[in-house]
Image (tube, rainbow, N blue to C red):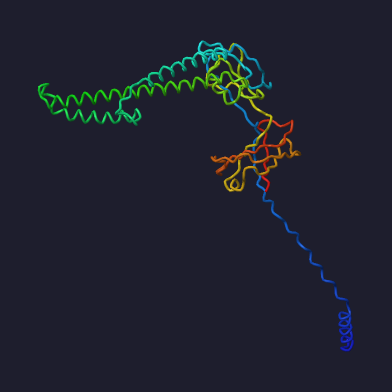
Amino acid sequence: MNTPKSLIMVILFGLLLSACGAAPSAAPAATAIPTVLADTAIISEGRLEPVRYAEIALNASGLVSEVLVTEGQQVKAGDVIARLESSEAKTLVTAQAEASQELTAAYQAVRDAQFKLDNFDIPSDFTGLTPTQAVSGTLDRLNTARQAYEPYRHLGANNSTGREYKKRLDDAWAKYRRAILWMEFESSTETAQARLAQAQKDYDSLQDPDFGENTAGARAALANAEVRAPFPGIITTLDLKVGEYASAGQPVVTIADMSRWVVKTTDLTEIDVVKLAEGQPVTITLDALPDKSLKGNVLSIGQNYSTNQGDVVYEVTVLLTEAEPAMRWGMTTAVKFEN
């Protein structure tokens, strides 16, 4: 059926009016995008360590006669850990007695050497010179006198010119020997004084009532029949058994001071290490205790480098200011360096 043109026009006109009369839809409001701040903190991996520890080796070989501690035991500085039986080794008491004798002998050696030096008649030619300068100067004059006498050496004692040059050569030899003797006296005095200084140091180390760390090395070397704790700590490794033979130079005891803890990084690259500074605050998270965060500060930044999977890395040591009873040596940590 054909639709009249007039009806089509009416329908189109109605649609147009409907479109014009519809309320405009509201434009959607713009949503602000929040600014995301990047976390610039540097994060590294590290290992937990006691603030100090020492692997102790024997300074003498021999049979282990006593072991006075056990692993896990707390010890004080100077406590005896073990003793050896050896003809070459000395106990602390024996070492102290020998050190006292050596100190007395060293004092006497200084007195004897100084007496000879003080009573040496220094020639007036040496005034203002040191013994070394006197030796150098008299040697030059001796060589000059020897060259001057050489052409006359075969002419015999009847040649007056030869006799004169011979006298000059003899005088040069005499002055040279006096200079050598003076230098020997001074050298002997200096050697005796050095011996006395070492004897005094050894004596003081062995007599140290506090068993200080600064004297522990000398004490261990001199009283080498005994293994003593160099500082307060816990025995973490003990490889000594009574009746067994122990060799010098082999670490047999590990002692650790666990009163404080440090973390040493293992993967801090050269790009990051230049952004750090000593004293910078640090947050530590232990893999074994992920819910605990501990505070600390950068103690030191290594000057030497190593490589890790092709990267140049530097060791940074962090001193913890907090601790947890469950912490153990060697635990893995995440180290976050705060800005």
State the residue in front, 191 or 56.
191
| Residue 77 % position (x, y) | 64, 22
State the residue in front, 74 or 223.
223
Residue 136 falls left or right of residue 259: left
| Residue 260 % position (x, y) | 68, 32
The image shows residue 240, relative to residue 214, as above or below, that is: above
| Residue 339 % position (x, y) | 67, 48
The image shows residue 275, relative to residue 145, as above or below, that is: below
Residue 136 falls left or right of residue 50: left
Q: Which residue is drawn at 68% across and 29% down?
A: 258
Residue 134 falls left or right of residue 67: left
Corner quadrant of residue 111? top left
The image shows residue 330, relative to residue 220, as above or below, that is: below
Corner quadrant of residue 165? top left
- Extreme residue toward the front, this view: 124
State the residue in front, 71 or 95.
95
| Residue 280 % position (x, y) | 65, 44
Residue 117 falls left or right of residue 209: left
State the residue in front, 259 or 31.
259
**Quarter of the figure that contains the N terminus:** bottom right
